[in-house]
């Protein structure tokens, strides 16, 4: 026990003395174990630290460490290897120091790089943030500006609309049939204009009163000397333009048109969703209307389209106010619910146009900066496609399809071949999908001359000699003229300009206005582009035969016809009384001189339409389609067919977007309008012919076609003129009233949403009738249409005016004094149709007004200048034999009873 205590005391002292150094020495031994293992060797060369290091790692005592340092082997190793080991240690320390330095420098460089990159990112993010803030502020300012523009445009549009409605109301009230009309006004000339409304066959034949109409008595006639400077200027401009524009020709685009890769974009087009917000899209646009192109802004919301013309545009300020009076849509607003079809269109041979067809049977056309904008606009509009008439799906990709795609995908050609549609309807279909439009006179629909005999007293439509050869263009019908054009093409010597047979096209804005210059608004359009002058009497459209002869003899006249030749007799009448001058043979020019076989314009239109639908035309119409819309339109086949026009008339011949010179661009646009624009090529192979009428027999289970059915076409195999009986399709039905009294007043409200659409008629004998109207007649494809519910007649006669049965007629003799005069202007039909107001003027300057609502007569007012007592009016007006109201006016289950009022 006495020997242990001192030992413990020494160990305690060692641990206390080496408690801070021992861990460091232990770490040194461990870190330098590879080196020490080679230097600390025993007397026999054995390693001393292998087992010692193992113990030293796990031990906390300093005794082993002290014993190692005090051992003889350690002393010998120190004496023997201390110098070399120190030197080696120094060298390794240096190497480690250099490596550490390099590592620290590399880490520092990387850290500096990272810091610099972060600083750059911070600067970039800061700049991006500032840019985003500036862009956001600019967008907000632009949005506020657009909202202000929309608000101001809406105010201006409402102001314009209010003025138009006010003027319309004044015109209705002050005309000779109006409530404020006077006898002096009844002697004045009534002016009418052609409305923009279209029927199912795209015919514009409705005339409305023209508040801006006049006889243009201040307009002079052109002299023959006036044409010489114009022709010389045209030649000069063509030469100047030719040398500048040939370089801009784009043959690659034309080659692309020859390919047939249309199915890719037609079958694969992703539908995009409308963006949120009050204004989905706002873009600069041009409103394309007859004879004007107005710049403005088109804005599309989620439910409406707005167009506001830029009235500060210098070009707009130059437009004549008389032309603007006939231009619609300058401050336009259209609801999405009104849109029925959207067609991609061309403008000046560029695929940047869009035409929108509305439910009110009108259309509007816009031109945009580029094709990308056109696509954005289409995808911002409802999915209506091109409508439901052509058998195509209602999708946006259809609206963006090319004319050739529409032609291949529709079923109209098959329907025409099966004779389900007429020649007229098929030609209108081809014109529509090929880009021809009423809104651009340079692309007006084109129709063929079909007759050649305009001299005979009678026209026999069974003789082939009376019909034109539709396999040749209008310029090649005369052999001598065909030889002239062929020689003109073969001997072409102009450098840089491709050869052509004809300088002008068969359809231009000038030729269209020439045909229609007798009816407004085309008269104003014609004068606007003709220096406010009518043409010289010997050069104007004065007669059908003269125009046909000009197309056969004049080498500069290759005009085809327009659709109005087949449905609009008013275009041949000078109903507005224009002074068109006197020809050199002292014949005054007024109405168009008709062929001898047409006694009146209606006869000419009827016979001309019969000729168009005849079997002779049907069997060769496909050849004329090849010339205008098909494979003979361009290329070698066009050369062989003598059907080549100036190269600037063709789609793809020039790209206006590549022209930076504004003067050159304007010159090119003028030349395109001068030369005309060829329709889009619909097919590059021969058009199939129409099936023979002899092979089309009505199925045995198909009932006979009634004469009023305009939707079904009945073909009799023994009839050579298939549409001779179908010419009555313009008259849907004839309604014969039991009484022979003429109808003097007609009013109707046939809107589909009404519970009882009806037409009100008033005869001279004051017989009132409410004839129910059936909206489902002839509207296949309309909402709610079904064969079971379809009515056979569009209008149903009022049962109260039919043969007397058990019911009584409702008389109004107790409110209308039959001794007083009652004209058609004394009747007002309220919009609900079944409410009729009648008033009469008595000899004692007193007046009486009555209402007949659903068959119940009711006195509304009675007044007189002498202040006659009101309580005497019913006694004076009601006869003793008046029928009681409870028996005379029984209400039907429908809630609206047609009524009759008789004297």
Image (spheres, rainbow, N blue to C red):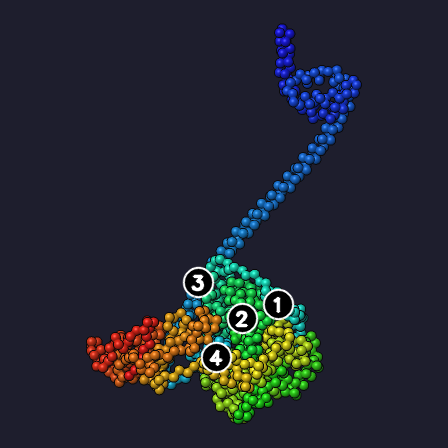
Q: Which mark is residue 335?
A: none
C-alpha span from label 3 to label 2? 40 Å
C-alpha span from label 3 to label 4? 58 Å
C-alpha span from label 4 to label 1? 42 Å
Q: Which residue is mark 2?
A: 391
In the rendering, at what x and y percent does residue 180 appear? 34, 79
Above or below — where is 21 with respect to 305? Answer: above
Density class for disc 2 (Cα within 10 Å; few <14, some 14-19, many ≥20) is few
Density class for disc 1 (Cα within 10 Å; few <14, some 14-19, many ≥20) is some
Q: Which residue is mark 4?
A: 703
* Nearest to the observer: residue 85 or residue 612: 612
C-alpha span from label 1 to label 3? 42 Å
Q: Residue at x 64, y 67 (%)?
A: 261
Q: Please, which residue is most extreme toward the top here?
A: 2
Q: Which residue is mark 3?
A: 151
Contact? badges 1 and 3 (CB < 8 Å): no
N-terminal label among 2 and 4:
2
Q: Seen in the image, is 855 located left or right of residue 4? A: left
Q: Seen in the image, is 774 located left or right of residue 378? A: left
In the rendering, at what x and y percent does residue 119 appear? 60, 43
Q: Secondary structure at mark 2?
A: loop
Q: Which residue is mark 1?
A: 262
N-terminal label among 3 and 2:
3
């Amino acid at each position: 026990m006495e020997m242990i205590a001192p030992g413990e005391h020494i160990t305690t002292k060692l641990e206390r003395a080496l408690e801070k150094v021992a861990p460091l020495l232990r770490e040194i031994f461990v870190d330098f174990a590879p080196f020490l293992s080679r230097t600390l060797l025993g007397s026999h060369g054995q390693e001393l630290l292998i087992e010692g290091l193992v113990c030293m790692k796990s031990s906390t005592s300093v005794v082993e460490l002290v014993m190692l340092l005090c051992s003889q082997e350690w002393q010998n190793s120190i004496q023997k290897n201390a110098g070399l080991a120190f030197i080696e240690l120094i060298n390794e320390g240096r190497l480690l120091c250099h490596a550490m330095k390099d590592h620290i420098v590399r880490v520092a460089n990387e850290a500096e790089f990272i810091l610099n990159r972060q600083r750059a990112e911070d600067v970039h993010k800061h700049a991006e943030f500032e840019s985003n803030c500036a862009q956001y502020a600019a967008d907000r300012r632009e949005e506020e500006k657009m909202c202000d523009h929309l608000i101001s445009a809406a105010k201006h549009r409402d102001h314009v609309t209010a003025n138009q409605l006010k003027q319309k109301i004044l015109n209705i009230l002050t005309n000779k049939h109006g409530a404020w009309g006077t006898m002096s006004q009844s002697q004045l000339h009534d002016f009418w204009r052609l409305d923009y409304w279209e029927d199912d066959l795209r015919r514009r034949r409705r005339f409305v009163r023209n508040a801006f109409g006049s006889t243009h008595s201040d307009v002079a006639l052109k002299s023959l000397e006036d044409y010489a400077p114009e022709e010389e200027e045209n030649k000069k401009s063509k030469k100047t333009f030719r040398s500048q524009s040939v370089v801009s020709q784009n043959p690659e685009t034309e080659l692309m048109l020859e390919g047939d890769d249309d199915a890719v974009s037609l079958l694969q087009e992703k539908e995009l969703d409308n963006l949120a917000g009050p204004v989905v899209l706002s873009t600069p646009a041009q409103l394309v209307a007859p004879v004007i192109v107005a710049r403005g802004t088109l804005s599309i919301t989620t439910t409406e389209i707005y167009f506001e013309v830029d009235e500060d545009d210098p070009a707009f300020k130059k437009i004549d106010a008389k032309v603007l009076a006939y231009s619609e849509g300058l401050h336009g607003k259209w609801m999405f619910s009104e849109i029925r079809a959207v067609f991609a269109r061309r403008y000046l041979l560029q695929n940047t146009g869009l035409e929108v067809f509305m439910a009110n049977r009108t259309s509007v056309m816009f031109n945009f900066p580029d094709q990308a904008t056109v696509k954005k606009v289409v995808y911002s509009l409802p999915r209506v496609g091109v409508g439901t008439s052509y058998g195509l799906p209602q999708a946006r990709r259809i609206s963006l399809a090319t004319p050739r795609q529409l032609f291949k995908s529709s079923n109209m050609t098959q329907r025409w071949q099966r004779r389900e549609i007429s020649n007229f309807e098929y030609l209108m279909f081809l014109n529509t999908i090929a880009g021809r439009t009423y809104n651009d006179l340079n692309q007006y629909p084109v129709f063929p001359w079909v007759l050649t005999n305009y001299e005979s007293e009678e026209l026999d439509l069974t003789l082939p000699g009376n019909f034109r050869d539709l396999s040749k263009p209008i310029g090649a019908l005369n052999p001598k003229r065909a030889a002239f054009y062929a020689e003109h093409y073969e001997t072409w010597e102009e450098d840089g300009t491709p050869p052509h047979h004809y300088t002008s096209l068969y359809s231009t804005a000038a030729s269209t206005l020439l045909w229609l210059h007798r009816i407004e608004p085309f008269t104003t359009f014609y004068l606007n582009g003709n220096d406010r002058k009518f043409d010289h009497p010997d050069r104007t459209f004065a007669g059908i035969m003269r125009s046909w002869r000009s197309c056969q003899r004049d080498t500069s006249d290759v005009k085809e016809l327009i659709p109005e030749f087949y449905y609009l007799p008013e275009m041949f009448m000078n109903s507005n009384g224009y002074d068109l001058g006197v020809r050199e043979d002292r014949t005054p020019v007024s109405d168009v001189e008709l062929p001898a076989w047409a006694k009146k314009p209606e006869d000419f239109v009827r016979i001309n339409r019969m000729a168009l639908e005849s079997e002779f035309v049907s069997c060769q119409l496909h050849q004329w389609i090849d010339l205008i819309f098909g494979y003979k339109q361009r290329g070698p086949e066009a050369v062989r067919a003598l059907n080549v026009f100036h190269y600037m008339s063709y789609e793809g011949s020039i790209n206006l977007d590549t022209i930076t010179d504004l003067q050159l661009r304007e010159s090119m646009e003028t030349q395109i309008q001068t030369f005309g624009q060829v329709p889009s090529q619909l097919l590059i192979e021969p058009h199939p012919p129409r099936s023979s009428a002899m092979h089309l027999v009505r199925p045995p289970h198909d009932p006979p076609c009634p004469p009023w059915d305009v939707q079904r076409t009945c073909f009799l195999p023994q009839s050579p003129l298939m549409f001779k009986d179908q010419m009555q399709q313009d008259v849907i039905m004839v309604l014969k009233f039991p009484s022979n009294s003429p109808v003097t007043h007609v009013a109707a409200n046939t809107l589909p949403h009404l519970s009882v659409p009806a037409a009100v008629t008033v005869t001279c004998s004051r017989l009132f009738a409410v004839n129910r109207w059936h909206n489902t007649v002839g509207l296949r494809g309309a909402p709610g249409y079904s064969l079971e519910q379809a009515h056979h007649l569009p209008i149903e006669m009022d049962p109260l005016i039919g043969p007397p049965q058990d019911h009584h007629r409702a008389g109004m003799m107790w409110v209308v004094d039959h001794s007083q005069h009652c004209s058609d202007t004394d009747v007002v039909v309220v919009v609900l149709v079944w409410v009729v107001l009648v008033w009469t003027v008595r000899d004692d300057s007193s007046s009486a007004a009555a209402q007949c609502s659903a068959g119940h007569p009711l006195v509304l007012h009675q007044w007189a200048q002498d202040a006659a007592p009101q309580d005497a009016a019913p006694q004076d007006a009601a006869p003793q034999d008046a029928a009681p109201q409870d028996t005379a006016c029984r209400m039907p289950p429908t809630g609206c009873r047609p009524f009759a009022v008789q004297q």
